[in-house]
Amino acid sequence: MKTDPLTIKELTDAVGGGVTPRMVRHYHTLGLLPPVQRSEGNYRLYTQQDVQRLQRIIALKQQGFQLSHIRHLLDSHSDDDGDPTLMAQLQQQYRSVIQQITRLRQTASALEGLLGRDQDCQITQAEALAQLKQLDVDAQEGLGKLDQLWLNLDAETTNHPEAFQESLQHLLPDLSGYSEITVHLLHQLVLACGDVSLVSAVRLSSGAIAAAREALKAGCSVVTDVPVVAAALDQTRLAHLKCAIATLIDDPHVTGVSEAEQAFWNHDRWQQRLHQIPQGCVLVVGYAPSVLLTACKLIEQGTIQPALVIGMPIGFSHAPAAKRQLMTTSVPSITVQGSLGGGLLAAVALNALAETFIAKPDCHCYLTRT
């Protein structure tokens, strides 16, 4: 490793990631990078400590932290006794981000209201676009006209059933790089929650589709974390495939995510059941993050060997951590990044795979396309 002082160009080359000298100068202006020594020609000279600090800045920026908070984070001494000021700032940033998401969701809803129209609504859609161009919203009366515009557009929806697949073609990103089986799975997940942006959060490990189809072909057992997830499974198709359904937390009173988490955490018998799930089963986790965390640990230890894990628990700290852990295991998996998920999505994922396997048992498109 070079120990001589680095020029700004050598600094950016060492850090990589698209960092430019202009960005470095900007970070100096903001105080993110401390003042450095200069050469006789007045050029900035950097050390390996500067390289490490800049790498931390870029890493935190990529995680979504604001530059002002990154400076406070790097300069704070929260390792010892906590930093309530920093936590308050981060909480304020979180509220701001949620407000931005809310505004973007409103924008997306407006666009979906136009772009998601099927062919039978296209005449009204064109009329709405023409009216939007001429709309005067300087006064409250103008806003009322906007509401009336949407009501007129919505009136067409009573004349025919909704064409979901046609709407998805208008709204979904380009899925031409995915196999037919995967596209159907993504379509079903979006239709289950009504959020097109879910597609970007779905993660399928290498070989997940193949593993699912092989397991279903073999009449694998299906193990869910709670009864409500089992209830959402396609009982008819799974019975046709001779796939028996079992539940870990076999308590009909456990109907919510909080109850499921506490039940698994507090009762050894449910944890022991997880140790005993059949080899080659499909494990479907839709509620309790601790079930997925424990399953990942048991997989790493070689204690359990499911053919596929569909891991989509809900939660804001344990669930994202469990999903990240799942994606590092060697077991084929399907998950949704972050806090998104739920029992319905987890069940829909398996239902979609069972549906396409029965409909197209000889399809091998998933083996040749991403």
Image: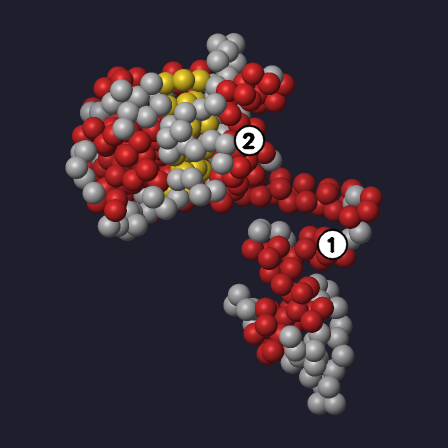
Dividing the picture into quarters, in which one does residue 152 lie?
top left
**Residue 133 picture location, percent across and down:** 34, 47
> From what the image shows, is residue 174 above or below residue 71?
above
> From what the image shows, is residue 232 above or below residue 123?
above
In the picture, measured across the screen, residue 56 lies left or right of residue 234, that is: right
Q: Which residue is mark 2?
A: 294
What residue type is disc 1 on? His
**Residue 9 picture location, percent across and down:** 59, 78
**Residue 92 picture location, percent across and down:** 67, 42
- The dot on residue 72 is 1
As helix, strand or loop, the secondary structure at mark 1 comes to helix
Dividing the picture into quarters, in which one does residue 116 lie?
top left
At x 49% / y 45%, what residue is drawn? 328
In the picture, measured across the screen, residue 136 lies left or right of residue 160, that is: right
> From what the image shows, is residue 367 above or below residue 110?
below
At x 46% / y 27%, what residue is drawn? 285
In the picture, measured across the screen, residue 81 lies left or right of residue 167, that is: right
- The one nearer the camera, 115 or 351, is 351
**Residue 27 picture location, percent across and down:** 66, 66
Q: Is residue 35 visible?
A: yes
At x 66% / y 78%, what residue is drawn? 2
As helix, strand or loop, the secondary structure at mark 2 comes to helix
In the picture, measured across the screen, residue 216 lies left or right of residue 10, that is: left
- The one nearer the camera, 261 or 120, is 261
At x 18% / y 34%, what residue is drawn? 360
Q: CA distance from mark 2 to mark 1?
A: 35 Å
